[in-house]
Structure formats: structure tokens, C-alpha cells
Image (spheres, rainbow, N blue to C red):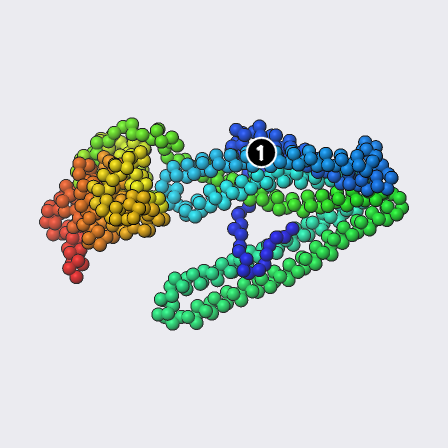
Amino acid sequence: MARGRLNSGSKAEAELPKAKINLDSLKRIAKLISYIKPYKGKFIAGIIFLFISSLTGLAFPSLLGALIDAAQGKQKYAFLPPTINAIGFLAFGILFVQAFVSFFRVVWFVQVAEKALADIRRDTYFKLITLPMDFFANRRVGELNSRISADLSQIQDTMTTTFAEMIRQLVLLVGGITFLTIVSFKLTLALLLMLPVLIVVAVFFGRFIRSLSRQAQDKLAESNTIIEETLQGIANVKAFVNEAFEAGRYNKNLREVVKIAVKGAVFRGLFASFIVFCLFGAIVGVIWYGSVLVHHHELSVGSLTTFILYSIFVGAAMGSFPELYANMQKSVGASERVLEILDEKGEAVSINAEENAIKQPINGNLEFDNVEFAYPSRSEISVLKGISFNADAGQKVAIVGPSGSGKSTMAALILQFYHPQAGSIRFDGVDAEKYALTDIRNQVAIVPQDVLLFGGTIAENIAYGKLNATHEEIIAAAKKANADSFITGFPEGYETVVGERGVKLSGGQRQRIAIARALLKNPAILILDEATSSLDSESERLVQEALEVLMKGRTSIIIAHRLSTIREADKIIVLEKGNIVESGNHQQLIANEQGLYRYLSQLQFETAKG
């Protein structure tokens, strides 16, 4: 029945949303059921064994009743042996059959469920990582992670346990009522008049208590949030002498938690009293009425025992259905959320690495032709307005401008994270749409401002630019990136674990590993997205030296915040509010007294001087 706890200190369970089970929802999740097809032999065998196990389970109340009657010298059923020992051996024989089929039923169901779930997880994860960037811009990482963890775990529970348990309880319910009617129609009528009403009341009572439990947990979560916020902003709390205010806020929240918990305890006590009196009272009533029938020789003692056991089967089956149905609803809801991902249109990337190899080489010529772009999530705001420029192979082209002018958006367009609404982007004079997506990304590398390293070793992070790189190639790339000296300074050298997101390394060290990764990739076009803007002077010098090596002989698009780093660029493009307002080299742009570039340059010089 109700499993909800109302202790305010217990941990709240994450409740998955439920979905209605109807013909439409079942049609939608049929795609997930198709994952069972490769294992349908074991699945069908498991279903058959489940029926056998359930039916043999139904035989035991009758056998136990027959044993009691046989002990009194009566034969309950003509088709059963008359002696006690014969009935006992038969019972053990049936028990062995049930144990045998139950073992294989459980093993087969788990094998089918685990293999099917592994296939669903694989396809969901692969679809997820091949979805366009706009998909991720509109969703939180935690939500997506929940779909692969919590939602698929719910589906797993249903496939391994809930589905089988529903069939088993249905067989026990139908079979139990059938045998109850055979044993005594009068007792069955009395039981069926009481039991469903009691179970319905108990289920609704249980739901109400669980609702109160969730309210208490939500309030407790609010109080934990207050603690977290206060401790994170403790300097502000102390600076404004607001300790008393925060203590009052926390105390008020705790009083509300106590109020809900006490209210829940009252209803829990009522529920416990209801269970003790009504349900056990119903059992006492049935036994009482059955004893009257035994006294009047309308029922044998063995038959009464059989009836009581079947009553327990039927009551347990009825009581389990609400929870099983709720689990099925959660599973349907979880399936629909997983299918939302599987039905999304992914990018043209293959699950086989060999199919993603470069088919159409790029020399490095890049051209923007009247490109207009707005992010799909903010389609009313134009980020780029008629952008046109070209970068010849081997040229260094810098893009500068105030924050929000569209610099990083241009980098995203070059990498084909997004596609322009108007105009075109061309590589070597060929429209980007004529290239395979993997051809472009395999030949374009980016060194971002905030480098994300994976949680493995330094060698693994460098090799991410070329997965089949040898150890010698990794070291050579690190040396060119000015990274070898600090890497070999670690006790584990290249096998040093960088920690989650590279937290064990400084900003300059992470940048140089990113440069080594890009060198290993050997791209035709390189994008430097403010790669030195957050570094100190010494780190910037080392990174800048590594960048000079990296840019040599390849087209480089340099998105710069510090203008001092781009004076040697072949071409500088000045962006403002999505428009190119100036273009030329450093000398040409600095000579324009009314130009934005000169203004930004003077502003940075004065800031540095100050």
C-alpha cells in the first residue's frame, strides 16, 4: 500500500512524471518495443514460463487444503491421490517445476531487457551527440542526462520486473477468483463485496499520504537551498549584517516543514488504524463466516484453509495493481521522452568512424558571401547582417569588435554548428552544403577561450585531435605547443590525469594542450576564439609562441579581444552589431581617425596604461 515516509529527514525520491496509457501512447512506444525483436525467442519463452510459474503457484492452496482434509480422512478432489504422503510428494514435485521455470523466466527476462536497453541507450546516446547545436541551446544538460539515466532506468524496471509482475498478478487474480468460486460461492460473494472497497480506500489514502510526504520534502529542499545560498554568499550576509534575517527565513521554512510532517503523521496514524481494523477485520469476518459454514458441514476445514490462502492471493493481486499501473504510466512517459530524442533529426555523422573519414580535401580558402544569420531560438534578432569577406589559403584574418557583435557566431558558422538563413559560406569556392559535414569539421580546428579537457590523461586529451596518433606524435605536438616542459614536470608525465574539465591544470596549460590537440589534427583552417584573453602575461607569451607555430602555413581566423595580438594579421575585419564596419590591415585601420578599430585600440591602450 502506501510506502511514503513522512519523516522530514528522509531523502525524497525523484518522481518521474506519468503519462496516460491509451491506444495512441501505446502506438508511440511501439518503436521501443521493436528493440525486443532480435531477442523475441527468449522473450516468448519467458512469457510461457511466466504463465507456467503463475499457474503452478495457484495449485498450492488446493494442495494444502487437500493435505488437511486427508489428515482428517477425507478426499478433497477425486483427481488427487488420497494419502497424505502422496499429496506431499506431489506438492514438492510441483514446487520443483515452479522453481525450475521461475529461474529461467527471470534469467531470460533480464537478458532480453538488458540487451534491448543497451541497444536503446546506444541509439539514444548516439542520436543525442549527433543532434545540431540548436537542440542543446534550448535544453539543460541535466534534463538530457535524466533521459538517458532516470527515464531509461524506469523503462528497464518495467521490462525486467513490472511487465512480468502485471501478467503474474493478473493470472493470480483471475485464477484465484475462479478457485474461490469453486471452493465456496457464498464466501466468495462475501469477500468480493468487501475487498475491492477496502483496497480502493486504502489506495487513495496511500496516495494522499505520499502527496503530503512530497510536500514535506519540497519544503525541506527549499530550506536546504536557503543554507546553500547563505553559505555561498556569506560575505554579503556579513557585510549587510543580515544574519538575523537569514536565520528567520530559515526558521520560518523549518516551521512549515514540521507543520506538514505532523499533518502527515496524523493521517498516517489514521491509515494504520484503518489497515488494522478494516482489512484485518475483513479477514476475521471471512474466517468467521467460513467457520459457520464448517460448523453446518457446508465446508470442510481443508476447503476453508484453501479459501483463506486464495483470498490472500486475490487481495495481494488487487493491492499490487495500482502501483504496477503507476509504474507502467511512468514507463510510458519515460518512453515518450526518449522517443522525442530518437525522432529528432540528427546531423549527417555516421556511427562508424571509417565512414567519417575525409573524402573531399580543403585547401584553406574561405569565403562569406552576404551571410545573414539569427539563432533559431531567437529568430527575431539578426546576429549577422550581410557579412561578406574572404580568407585565402594560408592567410591570417582577424575578427574584432565589441562584445555581442557576432564574432563567435562566425566561428560557429564556419564549423557548421549552424547554417545561415541567407547568403552562403564557401570552402575553396564550393558551397559548404556541397561538402560532407564531417569533411568540414575534420579539416577545421578551434582553440577556444575556455578550453574543455576531458577527465582522462594529458596524452588522451592531446590525442583527441587524432585518435590513432602514436605516442611520438603526441610528444612532438606537445613540444611545438610549448607544453612538453610542464607536462614532463609532472610525476606521471603524459599519463597525468587532468581531472574533471581539466581542473588540475592552469588556464595557460589547458590552452597549450588544446593547441597541441589542434596541431595533431593538422587542420586546413584554424579558428582561434580569443585564445589568450584570460591569461596572465607569462602564460600569454608561451601560448602566443605556440599559436605562431600552429598558424604557420594554414588559414587562420583569429577572433581577438586584445588587439595587440593581431597586429601582424594579413586582414582585420571590424564587426559592430552584426555588420562589417571596417576592413584592412593594422596600419590602414589605425590611420582612420574616425574608425572603430582605432577607438578600441586607444581604449585598450589607455586601460593598460592606467
Q: Secondary structure at mark 1?
A: helix
**Where is 221 relative to 587, above or below?**
below
Report the residue marked by disc 1: 108
Q: In this image, 363 relative to 312: left or right?
A: left
220 to 170, vertically: above or below: below
Which residue is drawn at the image coordinates 57% and 40% (left, top)? 158
* Left or right placement of residue 556 versus residue 146 in this view: left
Say how many tags the image has: 1
Image check: 22 left or right of 365? right
Which residue does the image show at 27% across and 44% down from the upper left?
514
| Position in image of residue 172 (x %, y %) | 70, 39
The image shows residue 293 at horizontal and vertical percentages of 86, 46
Q: Amino acid at mark 1?
A: Trp
**Nearer to us in this view, 110 or 27:** 110
Does residue 368 appear anywhere in the picture?
no
> In what quadrant of the picture does the C terminus appear?
bottom left
For the residue pair 392 and 381, the one nearer the viewer reads as: 392
Residue lying furthest front in this view? Answer: 491
Q: Is residue 438 above or below residue 295?
A: above
Q: Can residue 553 be seen from the camera position used here?
A: yes
Q: Residue at x 69, y 49 (%)?
A: 199
In front: 104, or 213?
104
Name which residue lies at 62% across and 36% down: 103
Percent coordinates x, y for residue 105 in the rendering: 61, 34
